Amino acid sequence: MTTNIPSGGGSTPAGNSDQPLYEAKRRVFAKKVEGRFRNFKWLILAVTMAVYFVTPWLRWDRGEYAPNQGVLLDLASRRFYFFPIEIWPQEFYYVAGLLVMAGFGLFLITSAVGRAWCGYTCPQTVWVDLFIAVERFFQGDRNARMKLDSSPWSFDKIWRIGATHLTWLLISVATGMGWIFYFGNAPSVFVKFFTGELPFVAYGTVMVLTFTTYAFGGLMREQVCIYMCPWPRIQAAMLDEQSLVVTYNDWRGEPRTRGAKKAAAAGLPVGDCVDCNACVAVCPMGIDIREGQQLGCITCALCIDACDSVMDKIGKERGLIAYATLEEYDSNMNLATSNRTTSIQPEKVRNADGSFSDKIRHFDWRIIFRPRTLLYIGAWSAVGLAMLFLLFTRERLDVNVLHDRNPQYVMESDGSIRNGYTVRILNMMPQPRTIRLSIDGLPNAVMKINGYPENKGQVYDIPVKPDEATALKVFVTLPKADVSSQAEEMRFIVEDPENGERRVYKAVFNGPGVKK
Amino acid sequence: MSEKHIDELSGVETTGHSWDGIRELNNPMPRWWVWTFYACIVWALAYTVVYPSWPGLTTNVKGYFGWSSRGQLATELTEAQATKAVYLEKIAATPVADILKDEELNRFATAGGAAAFKVNCTPCHGSGAAGGNGYPNLNDDDWMWGGSIDEIYTTITHGVRYTDDAETHASEMPVFGDILSPEEVKQVAAYVYSLSGGAPSDAALVEPGKALFADNCASCHGEDAKGLKDFGAPNLTDAIWLRVDGSEAGIAGQVTKPTHGVMPAWTARLGDTTVKELAVFVHSLGGGQ
């Protein structure tokens, strides 16, 4: 690490014993920047926004007995639909598995490419990016915004600021509404939202999300990341020496100077940094990356784009600010400072013709595949494959049996013994089916089901409703001659004769001889 | 801490606390954070105005809207009653036998009947409706007063030997100890015992017992001794014994000096709708015909 340890933005210099109680108020006016990382971020913004807003509108045909919304969280019926997959509450372990995968995924991404989640895909980052674009559209770029901010109130200022906030609010309302579409049929929820037919909780959700989007994206921005979010602390703890982080390579940048030619003429050592402050101006977090890796840095890499374009202009090699691992940075730093015995000496990292020395270490992509990340990839894949296996082999038919306990058995007038069971047949397919329910293990027993007047012996064909559990009160009667002194083992079998799905439940038949 | 400690690396003041040489940085908080704190205090004060809060000597401040958890429960119960009322009205308007044909109504009535049974019937019939000595088991297929849904409904409505109800099931078994000699009682008991497959103590008693049965008992219990539900006369040929343990001596005791069960008429207490629900529930227990 460099001389700077994470601190929440501006800290008082060492030796000042009168540290203020409160952090000074800062305004961040991020400057527009162009470059490959900026383009990549626009792409991610478009994709994530599209996923968020479009997903609930995608349709998926499940037949007439199930909703046709691609992704739907049906809380009232306790069903979760994800395209061809339908999850019942008792299958919630799939969600647990997804959370485990998210955890390992976070470990993997963070150990390999640092705080990429923060810098690219975090909703806070994406929405702030969008809000800054809106701000820029109405108020102009950094300098214009700073000027407008310090100018007295005028019609021009009012309409520009007002339009900005109004647009933010509209985006916030859309964001809030986008959320509730996941919990109901999106087109009808959309219509009902305006006719006032939705339950209060829907409007409450939209209000809360509108407020948080507006406040976090428009007003608080970097404050959310620095003071409210636990993620940066967790992620920072998961970085190691081989993790890629946005790094100011001071081993080639220092000593920085604005008058390079004059300094060179005077025989002073000159680094690549021309102290143009482009990296600071574009930073949405308002930090100076040249102070080193710090908590405020979300590694959005916009400073890399800014610095690269400056390096291009002055004819120097790109990468003064670059993604680098701490290991290669340290190695290069040691080279430039003779193992930290001197200040940075630019000539140590360069050949006589000004090109970089061969001893400079550059990023090697193979560093991503080290034991730690391979372990994460393995764990992530193992959980994922196990879930896929479970998903593709799971049955869409199940049976639960609850044995009557009070009374444990009933003697009929002919001396035969009857046991009662509540049998629940779970048809998890969105089609009505006819399920064959049978008993096995008691050859002379007779099964009787409430609501099915005719006695069919041991096999019944039960019509079950689509995507529902059907509860049956089942009585099994064993002739007196067959009743033994022990609890008899028996089985309830449900099967779909059409596709061969079959589930078995092991049950017990009690009689008078059974001592409990 | 008299002396302030400044962290060498970050230049930030520490809290002065040291754990194994590790010190905590004391970075200044942003001002909005403290405003959030004040907002929470204001919220808390407003909360005490809106909701019941400050304690007094005899009662507490009721809050602007007079909300209470008991009041909320009452509201929710009223709402639940309103939801149930739809079904209850339908049950009231439907003949009990037709309730069985309506799947939804049947399910509602069975659940309601189960709840009413737990409160009103378990003291005698047991929580599993399995009865006990003198109290019939309602799960089995043996019915003294009939096991069809209508018959069960009638029995619950008017009760058994319940003097306050004119239509109650009233018949009683005579005290045969006054009519038959002890020897004759033994003969009848031996015959009845043999009907359900028992081997009497003296096989010679069976023949005269059969003749005595035809003269004295068949009028109620039937020629075949399978009982007549009009009189509530139980089937004597089956495996189920209500008032006696099914032994020869037990049968003789019941013949000599019979005991009888009594059940209240329930409609006056519970109302017709609940009685219908109870009938549906009892019918669902497995013995319903």
Image (cartoon, coloured by chain):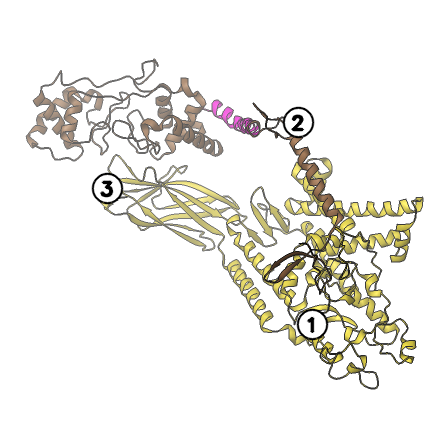
Chain colours: A yellow, B brown
Chain containing the residue with disc 1 = A
Characterize the magenta stretch by its predominant secondary structure. Answer: helix
Question: Per the image, is B17 magenta?
Answer: no
Q: Residue at x 7, y 32 (%)?
A: B202
Image spot of residue A118 (x, y percent): 70, 60
Residue A466 coordinates in the image, percent (x, y): 52, 45
Nearer to us in this view, A473 or B120: B120
> Dot 3: what SS?
helix
Side (left or right) of A158 relative to A382: right
Q: Which residues are magenta?
A: B72-95
Q: Which mark is residue B285?
A: none
Please give the residue where the numbered disc 3 appears in the rendered image.
A480
For residue A188, say whether it is visible.
no
In depth, the one of B135 and B218 nearer the eye is: B135
Q: Is residue B79 magenta?
A: yes
* Mark 2 closeness class: few <14, some 14–19, many ≥20 residues within 10 Å: few
Specify few, some or many for label 1: CA neighbours under 10 Å numbering under 14, 14-19, or 20 or more: many
Q: Quadrant of the N terminus of chain A?
A: bottom right
What residue is shown with label 1?
A325
